[in-house]
Amino acid sequence: MEYSPRGCDSILYSLAVDTFHCERLWLIIVNKYNWQLLCDNVALRSFFPGRTATGFQWFKNDQPVPGATEDDYAEQNELYGRFQLRVTLDGNQEIWSNIIELLDTHVELPIQVRIYNSRGMEIREDQAVHGIYLFRYKQGDNVWTEKKWIP
């Protein structure tokens, strides 16, 4: 801030805009149930008709993934992180995909319990007082049973 002899303060700003390195992000990757990411080759061909993809490189958390050079990407487990795909087209033109961010929001599912008496009839928990009972547990797709004897 400078003081002007006329008693006014002034602020001088300088702004430079670099339009040479602007990158457009193309909507060309698809998330399949947080287990696999795919390049949407149909969308890629519609954006760049007559062009051919000659190379792919997947990025996770802004870092290239070693060996991830196909048009799809998966890991051993569910995917978490920030993912992007760099596609090299014929003529060595590189384009960047949209960014997909997959958060670890895994929530533990509740366990549902059903109790059956020795005659195979379902009962409430407060009715299981004496005898042999079958407890059936279900948590998501996981189901297990347990026999209990209550003296």
Image (spheres, rainbow, N blue to C red):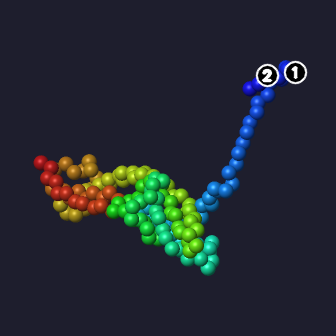
For label 2, count other residues whose C-alpha is less than 10 Å away and answer few (under 14), some (14-19) or many (20+): few
* Residue at 28%, 61% in the rendered image: 143
Q: Amino acid at mark 1?
A: Arg
* Residue at 47%, 71% in the rendered image: 71
Q: Nearer the viewer, residue 125 or 60?
A: 60
Where is residue 25, by image quadrant? bottom right
Residue at disc 1, secondary structure? loop
Rendering coords of residue 16 (x, y %)? 71, 45
Q: Are marks 2 and 1 in contact (CB under 8 Å)?
A: no
Residue at disc 2, secondary structure? strand
Q: Which mark is residue 3?
A: 2
In the picture, the quarter occupied by the N terminus is: top right
Residue designated by label 1: 6
Q: Which mark is residue 99?
A: none
Is residue 15 visible from the viewing direction of this image?
A: yes
Where is residue 135, by image quadrant? bottom left
* Residue at 41%, 65% in the rendered image: 68
Rendering coords of residue 15 (x, y %)? 72, 42
Q: Horizontal placement of 5 versus 45: left or right?
A: right
Task: State the CA–CA distance, disc 2 to disc 1.
Answer: 8 Å
In the rendered image, the residue lying farthest to the right is 6
Is residue 42 visible from the viewing direction of this image?
A: no
* Residue at 37%, 62% in the rendered image: 75
Q: Horizontal placement of 132 versus 125: left or right?
A: left
Q: Nearer the viewer, residue 91 or 27?
A: 91
